[in-house]
Image (tube, grey):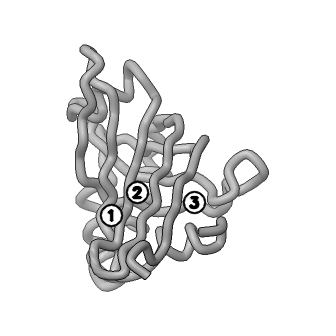
Amino acid sequence: MDDDEVVAFLEALPARTAKLASVRADGRPHLAPIWIALDRSTAGPDSPIGDIVFNTDPGSVKGRNLSRDPRLALCVDDDTPPFSFVIVEGTATVGDDPDELLHWATVIGGRYMGADQAEAVGRRNGVPPELVVRLRPTRIDAQARLAD
């Protein structure tokens, strides 16, 4: 897939759940399903698809892992034939700005629950102590239509 195809795959509706891998304190991987959105406003030469944004609680396993080690890997796949996937490796930055938190919780909620539920999900999920996490891609591996 080229960059435009990766963006289209990651932004497709209905939204696909992403699987996020972070690094535990003892070096073991931790894998968790998450909801994501792309911030295309951050796209540029060093990040052609932009940042991948999600929310997390700082006390969750992934939140604690991120406080120690910002390295992440994320996979989004289409598990129906002919099968496609996008794997993103990168580093994360974490923020707690309340306006940004509410904005992204609402965007993400709308992607996964529908536009009619976006505001309610945003109000529920976009509150402290939740954090906004931005995954800046450093490597992307994307394959489309593997079974063709």
| Image spot of residue 124 (x, y percent) | 23, 59
Whichever of labels 2 and 3 marks the residue nearer the N terminus, that label is 3
Whether label 2 touches label 1, CB < 8 Å = yes
Which quarter of the rendered picture does the C terminus lie within? bottom left
Residue 43 visible: yes
SS class, disc 1: helix
Q: Is residue 148 left or right of residue 18?
A: right
Q: Residue at x 75, y 54 (%)?
A: 44
Dot 2 amino acid type:
Leu
Q: Quadrant of residue 106?
A: bottom left
- Dot 1, crowdedness within 10 Å: few (<14), some or many (≥20)? many
Q: Going 44% across and 59% down the picture, which residue do you hit?
A: 104
Can residue 111 be seen here?
Answer: no
Residue 145 vs residue 76, the one in the foreground: 145
Viewer-nearest residue: 124 or 36: 36
For marks 3 and 1, the one nearer the N-term is: 3
Separation (CA) of disc 3 from disc 1 = 16 Å
- Return the x and y of residue 24 as percentages of the image width and height: 27, 23
Quadrant (top left, top right, bottom left, bottom right) of the N terminus = bottom right
Q: Which mark is residue 23?
A: none
Element type at mark 3: strand
Vertical comparison of 79 with 57: above or below? below
Q: Residue 21: give x, y in percent of width and height.
A: 33, 40
Q: What residue did someone put label 2 on?
A: 102
Residue under label 1:
122
Name the residue carrying label 3: 39
Judged from this view, the residue extending furthest toward the right is 45
